[in-house]
Amino acid sequence: MDMVLLDWTRMGKTYCLAGVVRHNGQLRVVRPLPITGRTAPVRNIGWSPFLMDGHSRWEIFELIHPESADPCPPHLEDLWVRGMRSRRIFADSALRRAILQATLAQPGEPWFGAALTTTRASAYLMPRTGLRSLISLVVPAHAIQFTVSWREGAPEADYRVSLAVPELQGRSLPVKDHFLLRRAELASDAAEGRIQALSFAVAQMGEQVVVRLGLSRSFQSTAGRAESVCWLMADGFFSFNDPQC
Amino acid sequence: MSSHAIVARLLDRLHQVRELLGQELLAADANTRFVDALDSMGFVEFLALVAEDYGVPVETIEQAAGRRYGSVGEFAAALDAAGLSFGHNIPPQARSASDGIPASAFRTQKASAWLAATAAKLPANRQPASAINALLHRPPGWLEEHAGIEARYLWGEDDPLDAAAHTAQDCLRQAELSPSAVGALLVTSEAPPLLTGLAAALHARLGLPTGSAALEIGGACTGFLSAVWTAQHLLSDMAAVLVIAIEAPSRWLPLSPTPVGEAAALFGDAAAACLLTAQSVCGNSLYLRDIVLGTDGAAGPLLRVEMAAGRGAELHMDGIALAHRAVRTMAESVQNVCTRNSLAVDQLASVIAHGGNGRMPALLARRLDLRPQQVHSETTRTGNLGSTSLPVAWSARTPSASHPVVWAAVGAGLQWGAALFDART
């Protein structure tokens, strides 16, 4: 089974990946998970940078021995695989556009198949609800605003984005897009410089930007900590007209 | 605000966010580092709360902190150094020009509410019990003896909306606030003078900003407390909420020598308003320490309003059972709100009570083991004023610095409530 790699996000020291496969003539989003983590209590299992660095989004990978995972809403895209092997080719522009188009949120329907709960600053879905964990939105570039801050001692800065869309009303989503973050990190060590770099990168995408939205994994409740919710995150930013890496 | 107070407020917010995220309380102090106390998602919630406290966008907070967050104490110092002070979104131009209460007076207490001003207005047209008895074909003294009511007031040709707007304007004057400071208008009425658009009509007469909400709150005779309860919650997001109660039963309940017509005679017209603010704005502001509401729909048949065949409406009630239940329920509400706040009823300076009839306040005093003078009601003088009875009684009492006080009401539904006001800071 071949997958076009679409979402490449940071999850601690590993990467969380998602892509699109053809299934019965349709484009279907999948989240490949290394089968070595099958017994983990929560599927927050990432891919090692040793395996993934040097590759890119829109690259086509063969999914080795894919097996459907037990449904775990909203992450119904989960797929166990024994590995991923690059085909060393990329999806062409037409396929990229088709993928972005196919993953757009449907007007008038809840983005993830269930209504998001909003907090003051963010939004989330309760675990075990919803029909999907990844969607795409088309957002005007001018409606995208980044901030960067540091909690001293944290392994990396907190990157957030506000999307001026009615459903979010300026709420602030964590930015997990590995490629965008890497671009900001290379541009500057200072927060203001990184904000500029993020803004510049999005401005270069044209007037219409596809923002990939995803839901975080919840984790198990532990002593002193309730089960986590599935937070809304910004997983990727693409030009709608010319979706590049 | 002192640096110590800022730290205390920030720690309060930090705990609030941890609670929101289902995390256990943390022994935190000024030296607590944010990275140890909040994860990325918690931290963004925390910043939003702090921005709300200061009445500024999150970006302003981020800039004040230089986008770096070490310890709580360092953050407090950065906010202080940036010249930010706790505020609550009242722009300076929203203040009346007459007096110089500083903008810092609007520092917010999260989820706290203050009764800043109250005003009431009765119609000019007084209808004495003797006239009512005549209309009911009852002998002289019947209404006084039967219901403890000596008179009621009727709007007649007066415009009830004008009267209600006048009371609200009076409240704003007392608090020295302009209409633009009002975040929401809550209007309650058991017998409204306007069938639709009542809140919007009053909103227009007051010249409130088009961006401020105008809501109609139900609850019959408990409507005023329902509105205050709602206002308290709204005040976490806005600086001031106006509550208006307006009653025009004379437009709905015609008197006649029938049981239905006699029930109508218990009710009088009135209008009243109060202004609730997120912070004390004047010397006699009273702190809303607690408010409880209750509902028992199964007891609804005790008092029913039905459309009359001819005109208006008919009020049917099981008078004795209703009065008994009402007194008991109000007494329990008063005791409940006191118990919740570690108060004994005898520590109350007074109780402001809704009176379904003129006898109920005295019965309530007896049930609560208070002196009759400690329970205030205007029902004897005005009849049952529905949702306006509490602010009318409060406005009519001899001003006193004694506190705490409880306002209590019970109404059709059945619904009931009690609000505890105190003068704490």
Image: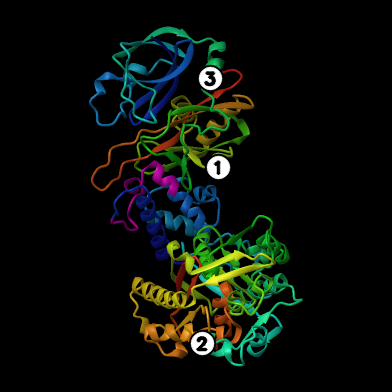
Q: Nearer the viewer, residue A98 or B204?
A: B204
Which disc is residue A102 wearing? 3
For residue A75, what is the image quadrant? top left
Q: Position of residue A52 (x, y in %)?
A: 36, 18
Identify residue type, mark 3.
Ala
Q: State the residue position of label 1.
A: A170
Q: Label 1 marks which chain's residue?
A: A
Give me the C-alpha separation between circle 3 and circle 1: 26 Å
Which of the two labelled residues, at mark 3 and mark 1, occupies the earlier sequence position?
Answer: 3
Q: Is residue B34 magenta?
A: yes
The residue positioned 50% from the left and 51% from the top of the image is: B61
Q: What kind of residue is marked 1?
A: Gly
Q: Amino acid at mark 2?
A: Ser
Question: Was residue B213 drawn as part of the magenta stretch in this picture?
Answer: no
Which residue is at a point 41% across and 27% down the rendered structure image? Answer: A9
Q: Label 1 crowding class (10 Å Cα cut-off): few <14, some 14-19, many 20+?
A: some
Q: Which contiguous range is marked in magenta?
A: B27-45
Check disc 2 and report the residue beneath it: B400
Element at badge 1? Answer: loop
Q: Separation of disc 1 and disc 2 at Cα?
A: 47 Å
Question: Which residue is painted at 62% across and 26% down in the image?
Answer: A208
Instruction: Have a look at marks 1 and 2 and say if they share a chain.
Output: no
